[in-house]
């Protein structure tokens, strides 16, 4: 018989509260970054440099000439692809002269420098991508199969799914120092290279901190989900 601590009223599984909390954190973070970006996307930089121009200047100042800067469609779809060595800047970043666009473009260049300098956290994250991908794909099928079985075999199959899921959680946790590190580099470069003034850099910092919160919220949600799965597995063991 399941403990009352897991259920309340009409058989409601209290562990779902962990999922709900995680979802609320993610939605709040996404809403905050969108509103923050929208606010500073209306603030033009005094230098009048676009996000693409800022990215190219940063790369040139660091002696990096084998990385291209390209435009990709979408909103806040900016990313650096280390395989093709391309900094992809979205509609709101590539041709915009706002402090928000320049901050985001510089952040992606921060990843380029991490890649060039073989940053420890970035290297580790890249190394675990294959196992994290396999783990995220295998986790839920194993957990669902385990829930349909009885006895000790149920517990071991669910735990196998939990371990697989933990690999994707590890990936998200390692992503945090990678993203914070790229932002730290970005803010230093845009001010040191004269791309933005000190006040404008402070405004870009607000944008990048808001963006970082989405990674924090996502990692927190994954940790909460992992905790929930461990609680489910322990029920089967008991």
Image: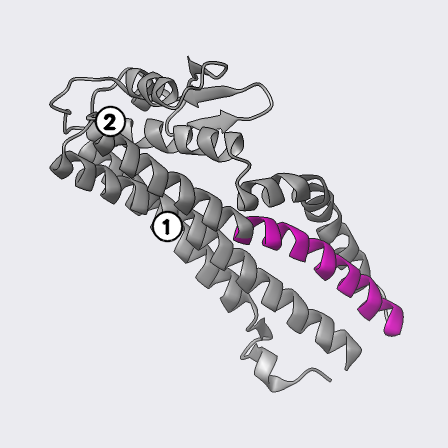
Task: Identify the image quadrant of residue 144.
Answer: bottom right
Find residue 48 and report its horizontal and vertical position in percent. 16, 17
Magenta stretch, overall SS:
helix
In the displayed structure, does residue 75 sit left or right of residue 238?
A: left
Magenta segment range? 152-173
Q: Going 59% across and 49% down the picture, which residue do you hit?
A: 171
Find residue 227 and report its horizontal and vertical position in percent. 60, 68
Q: Which mark is residue 193?
A: 2
Residues at badges 2 and 1 in contact (C-beta under 8 Å)? Answer: no
Neighbor class of circle 2 (other Cα within 10 Å; few <14, some 14-19, many 20+) is few
Q: Going 26% across and 36% down the picture, which residue do you hit?
A: 37
Which residue is identified by label 1?
213
Q: Is residue 205 magenta?
A: no
Find residue 65 and report its horizontal and vertical position in percent. 45, 14
Q: CA distance from mark 2 to mark 1?
A: 27 Å
* Secondary element at image label 1: helix
Task: Identify the image quadrant of residue 53.
Answer: top left
Q: Going 31% across and 46% down the picture, which residue do you hit?
A: 209
Number of numbered discs on residues: 2
Quadrant of the image containing the N terminus: bottom right
**Towards the viewer: 222 or 97:** 97
**Towards the viewer: 21 or 210:** 210
Relative to residue 211, is residue 225 depicted above or below? below
Find residue 54 and report its horizontal and vertical position in percent. 29, 20
* Secondary element at image label 2: loop
**Towards the viewer: 238 or 70:** 70
Relative to residue 179, is residue 11 depicted above or below? below
């Amino acid at each position: 018989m399941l403990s009352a601590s897991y259920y309340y009223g009409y058989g409601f599984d209290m562990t779902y509260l962990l999922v709900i909390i995680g979802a609320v954190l993610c939605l709040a973070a996404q809403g905050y970054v969108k509103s923050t970006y929208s606010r500073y996307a209306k603030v033009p930089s005094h230098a009048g440099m676009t996000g693409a121009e800022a990215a190219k200047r940063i790369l040139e100042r660091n002696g990096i000439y084998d990385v291209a800067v390209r435009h990709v469609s979408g909103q806040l779809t900016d990313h650096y692809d280390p395989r093709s060595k391309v900094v992809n800047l979205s509609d709101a970043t590539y041709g915009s002269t706002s402090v928000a666009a320049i901050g985001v473009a510089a952040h992606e260049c921060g990843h380029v420098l991490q890649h060039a300098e073989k940053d420890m956290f970035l290297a580790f994250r890249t190394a675990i991508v294959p196992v994290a991908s396999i783990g995220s794909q295998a986790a839920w099928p194993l957990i669902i199969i385990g829930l349909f079985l009885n006895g000790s075999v149920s517990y071991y199959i669910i735990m196998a799914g939990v371990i697989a899921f933990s690999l994707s959680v590890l990936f998200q946790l390692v992503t945090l120092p990678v993203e914070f590190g790229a932002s730290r580099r970005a803010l230093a470069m845009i001010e040191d290279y004269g791309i933005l003034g000190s006040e404008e850099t402070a405004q870009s910092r607000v944008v990048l901190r808001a963006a970082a919160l989405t990674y924090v919220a996502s990692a927190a949600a994954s940790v909460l989900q992992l905790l929930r799965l461990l609680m489910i597995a322990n029920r089967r063991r008991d």
